[in-house]
Image: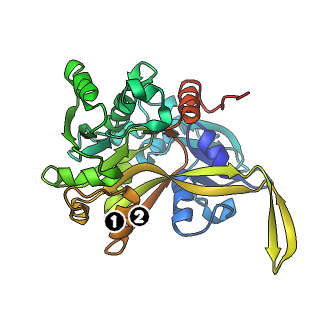
Amino acid sequence: MAMKVLTTGSEKVLFVVNESDKLVGSLTDGDIRRAILNDMGFDVPVADIMFKMPRFVRHMDKKMEEAAKTRILNDRVPAIPVLDEMDRIVDILFWYDFFDSHPLESHVPESLTNPVVIMAGGKGERLDPFTKILPKPLIPFGDKPIIEKIMDDFSKYGLRRFILTLNYKKEFIKAYFSENPLQYDVSWVEEENYLGTAGSLALLKDKLKETFFVCNCDTILENDFNSMLLWHKGEKALITIIGCHKEMVIPYGSLEMSGGSLKRINEKPQLDLIINTGVYILEPEVLSFISPGEKMDMNHLIEKVMERGKVGVYPVYTGWFDMGQWKEYKDSLYLLQNGSNKPKHK
């Protein structure tokens, strides 16, 4: 429940109170991420993972707003509670009460040299019949094609160098970027044959000399790429997979058995999963696992790398939109335009 509330809130922080309404802790997506990475599961009590010494200011303090502004700025927190003499929350002051920019925006580097490889060569058969006319990267998403939306999201975090791998209807994509120059460094390589979701990376061995991102061209991820990069470096991983939490309800009653006898019926059980978003961070030495011209999917590459080094997972909880199928495309477009309220399907 806490995760669901946290992902739908705009400020991504919860303040926890006890039965007497006294403040006892705070919870952020970072706290949940640490719990999952420590194998604590999705049903761990909030009290076990919350920060038990949250920052706050007192309502009675004559310089309360000044103190709140200082703490919000120094600690880079999106909000701070205002407490009465009984430690009960009487108000919450937010970053935007004092500053124009978002707290994340103020520490994003102006430009990073790390390249972003966008896999733009597939046929996009799941979006047929659109992709019989246009390549998937150029399918409209609002007033821009999908690939430009992807670039815009990366550029917010200082990532402005993009390398495209092209194959299907590549002339359309090259023409688009030639006729619509963007404020980004955009280049491409061309596959002669379909090499899979990882095979085309072998074409980039001379271009990729530092840590780089890989992104499918049907994946939109609105998250802090700079934090992902820092985490990847800190973990010394060869590959980091960006995963997103998803709740999936099985629309049937499942039977739990033991030795042929029924133990219980679980009606429409809910599964909590971390789904592969199709966004990765790779070290350049990973390219040595791919032979030139070899057809290889990303899953196969990951399995090979796991035998030699660490593959990390960085979980996020919101901001992932799968554009690869019609239903998801329409739902994602609706959600991005209308917020978190899901569309109703007849």
- The percent coordinates of residue 222 (x first, y second) are 45, 39
The quarter of the picture where residue 163 lies is top left
Q: At label 2, which amino acid type do we have?
A: Gly
Q: Which mark is residue 237?
A: 1
Q: Which mark is residue 312?
A: 2
Q: Can residue 100 be seen in the rendering of this structure?
A: no
Q: Can residue 303 be seen in the rendering of this structure?
A: yes
- The percent coordinates of residue 65 (x first, y second) are 53, 35
Frontmost residue, 346 versus 107: 346
- Locate residue 266 relative to residue 210 in the image: left or right: right
- Locate residue 72 relative to residue 138 in the image: left or right: right
Name the element at disc 2: strand
Q: Earlier in the sequence, mark 2 or mark 1?
A: 1
Mark 1: few, some, or many residues within 10 Å (few <14, many ≥20)? some
| Residue for point 49% across, 37% down | 126
Name the element at disc 1: loop
Frontmost residue, 90 versus 177: 177
| Residue for point 53% across, 32% down | 329
The quarter of the picture where residue 162 lies is top left
Relative to 130, residue 54 above or below: below
